Amino acid sequence: MMTTNNLGLYIHIPFCVRKCRYCDFLSFRCSDKTKLSQYADVLMAEIRMRSEDFIYREVDSVYIGGGTPSMLSEWDMGRILDCLRDNFNIVKDAEVTIEANPATLSDEKMERYLRKGVNRLSLGVQSFENDVLEFLGRIHNKNDAFYTYQKAKKAGFENINLDIMFGIPGQTMKMWKDTVRQCIFLRPSHISLYSLQIEEGTEFYKMIYEDGQLEPIPEAADREMYHAALKMMKHAGYEHYEISNAALSGYKSRHNMKYWSYEEYLGLGLGASSFIDGRRFNNYREMSEYMKAVRENR
């Protein structure tokens, strides 16, 4: 299955300011800076431990996801990035991505990311409609998104992805097209467009299937939104290269491509998934179990 000696790294940061109403990712609220730093310490211990088995591999993509990685202080994130470079053979032109929420990304954090080798920023915008953002449970508004994007460009990020979402209950085609139009206007190098999936255990699932408070968007309308966005992006010069991704020339995500082409990646952090030697496996999903395992060097 694997055609190269290259390896991808996925680093999971499971913390967020507030759990979004649609989110079923392994993430939870935490504002305790001591706990965030403790997690960084254990994560670095895992990095040092797991790297021993991959010394011979060249790492050409690193993806730091969550949760909200930008919740961590710039110092803790800097320590993690240093630890990765000290323990893995990260190639000079590696794609290093970090996810961020517009409301948690400061100038100091962006400066630190760039200095530590992060060269791709993924902003979870989701919508440029304030009512939609509030409905989703996001902690930012559309002005935060515009302002943060401009700050990131000014700071020196050339490769920026914007996440946007469609198929949201109450979202009209006009609202969706306005979000796509504003996204294209900003001219990010990459756009990820996701259809809202109603997952069991989320607040939206309860509102739809248990309380009957919401009506999901019909599948036909969802598909119409998807194809309308792809048409607008193609007209603006974006190449649709995966189900949920479009990019300007030269900006396809190397890490995304690994998932689609069955290349190998190692997951580090709470609950992180790996695909090695044709086998998929996960870290512990319970924080106490994860921390105990790392401290016992397993």
Image (cartoon, helix red, strand yellow):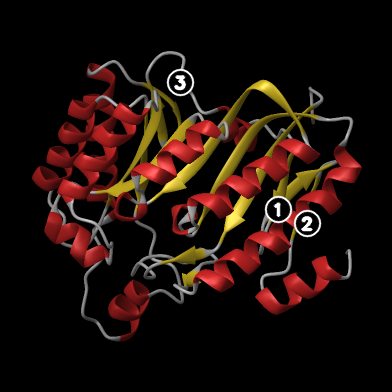
- Using the image, tell me which numbered label, if any, was put on residue 28: none
List x then y, in percent, for residue 203: 35, 76
> Which amino acid type is marked by label 1?
Leu
Q: Is residue 217 above or below residue 180?
A: below
- Using the image, tell me which numbered label, if any, was put on residue 46: 2
The outermost residue toward the left is 174
- Answer with mark 3 or mark 1, whichever residue precedes in sequence: 3
- Number of numbered discs overlaid on the protein picture: 3
List x then y, in percent, for residue 170: 15, 61
Residue at image location 28% in from the left, 20% down from the top: 234
The outermost residue toward the bottom is 211
List x then y, in percent, for residue 173: 13, 45
Residue corresponding to mark 1: 268
Residue corresponding to mark 3: 251
Asked if the residue at tag 1 contacts the one at tag 2, i.e. Cβ–Cβ closer than 8 Å, the answer is yes
Of tags 3 and 2, the one toward the viewer is: 2
Residue at image location 49% in from the left, 74% down from the top: 32
**Distance CA(mark 2)–CA(mark 1):** 7 Å
Asked if the residue at tag 1 contacts the one at tag 3, i.e. Cβ–Cβ closer than 8 Å, the answer is no
